[in-house]
Amino acid sequence: MLAGRKERRFSQKSRHLGRMGPTSQKQLAGFRWAMDAHQSGLLQQLLQQDPAYDYDLIVIGGGSGGLSCAQEAAVLGRKVMLLDFVVPSPRGTSWGLGGTCVNAGCIPKKLMHQAALLGQALTDSRRFGWEYSQQVKHSWATLTEAVQSHVGSLSWGHRLALREKAVTYLNSYGEFVEHHKVKATNEKGQEAFYTAAKFVIATGERPRYLGIQGDKEYCITSDDLFSLPYCPGATLVVGASYVALECAGFLAGLGLEVTVMVRSVLLRGFDQQMAEKVGASMQQLGVRFLRKFVPVEVQQLEKGLPGRLKVVAKSTEGTETMEGVYNTVLLAVGRDSCTKKLGLEKIGVNISEKTGKIPVNDEEQTSVPYVYAVGDVLEGKPQLTPVAVQAGKLLARRLFGGRSEKCDYVNVPTVVFTPLEYGCCGYSEEKATEVYQAENLNVYHARFWPLEWTVACRDSDACYAKIICNKLENDRVVGFHVLGPNAGEITQGFAAAMKCGLTKQLLDDTIGIHPTCGEVFTTLEITKASGLDITQKGC
């Protein structure tokens, strides 16, 4: 009887709620939001806002990580300021919002990589029946104009997004002057001061110079290359990082004469077998490598756009010296963290003396509890745009949204956009051997010949696939490596599988998509230890 009365009351209450007007419905929605916020801890955090500060959060740095964190915090109802100021390069290059990725990194690099691939596609097209008599040539001016137009649209889009989310954006350089207080200096030298309860450092890195005669006067870096107002001509790329090889690759693909000067090894930190295969594929395209040499002086022989430069270099293994003449010298010898002029020492934030990076705990918190950091300034974390975006977003949710999820820095996939792309996820073979010992590993590998390359008569031995499996965990895949067309697209999917505990047996049980490059990972049979031939046979 009692249960029946409760059911009738609930039914009557439901009918009453259904007859509520718009105002009452909004009140009910507000009540529900308050209850949800109370249960998640968000309401308590909102009530704890300190009115003594100008802002709940000030983010210093308007790159991928800083933008992600600032916008997420604003969505969660916090008062947020973002400070971003790009110090011009020695050649005078600067840019707007978006950081290196948007303006002088991932985005323009991938577009110029695509331009080079289209040049190769033109060559291949004749084998597929395309006939054209006119001479095909490349226009550097057209390319850079198109790339910069797209980059500008992305930067403007970031400004609009900040405005829509009510984030206060200042094109000013941020520097701590005391605890909880920063000085913001704009391009005119005008200063303003702001306080906040919490801060996030997301200032990223900038290219390193060699400290030799003529480097800042005559050389360029990746900061300058993508908006260079003239074709670079014969180019010397100094360095063997992924930035160096990617730039060398697309410049060669555009038909320019390219030389790469390498101090030690290619792609330090990456799988060295794969790195050497990348180098070999670039040599086939005409890129010249000068191994075990470093520049000691750059001299200007002729002014002009691009002009002529003489580079004097010395051997790293002896007393031998050499000279070369180039139109452009591109330095890609590493990057330095932008942490030294932020006033961090005034508030006690620890910075690595060796690297200039900021050590943090597993919640991106620095040695000062109210100061956090994300992105490339972090010590020992992957320096990749998606990592910074994820870390910034999750940090804001933990600080202001009552969430607990932390950024997972394990098994982060990446790709080197050389002409023949190299994608990887997990351990290199060297690192896997160090962690698990060689006797506990199975390394499966194969060469493959993309179908699109057969008619075009491209090299049948250039593309390569490799997985590294831990025998002690049911042959779990701990390293994934592929060298071939669209390696980034291939790697992305397998990275998700590795997050789920991918094993060799699961790969064997997966039916491949035919004919694709990715299907090679579903048919791997030969281990390195066997010494058997890995040339792919048949279709």
Image: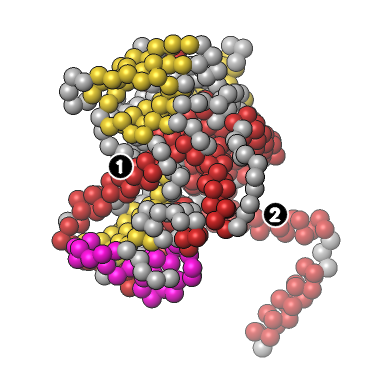
Q: Nearer the viewer, residue 138 or 23?
A: 138
Which residue is painted at 33% across and 48% down in the image? Answer: 277
Q: Is residue 370 left or right of residue 32?
A: left
Q: Which residue was labeled with disc 1? A: 269
Question: What residue occupies the far bottom of the structure in this picture?
Answer: 1
The relative height of residue 506 versus residue 102 in the rendered view (above or below) is below
Q: Earlier in the sequence, mark 2 or mark 1?
A: 2
Q: Which residues are magenta?
A: 507-534
Q: Secondary structure at mark 1?
A: loop
Residue 74 included in the magenta stretch of the image: no
In which quadrant of the rendered image does the C terminus lie? bottom left
Question: What residue occupies the far front of the structure in this picture?
Answer: 133
Q: Nearer the viewer, residue 97 or 491?
A: 491
Which residue is painted at 36% across and 11% down in the image? Answer: 213
Residue type at mark 1 is Gly
The relative height of residue 5 versus residue 531 in the rendered view (above or below) is below
Which residue is painted at 60% across and 45% down in the image? Answer: 76
The picture places residue 95, in percent across and down from the top left corner, at 59, 26
Q: Which residue was labeled with disc 2? A: 30
Which residue is painted at 75% across and 72% down in the image? Answer: 13
Residue type at mark 2 is Gly
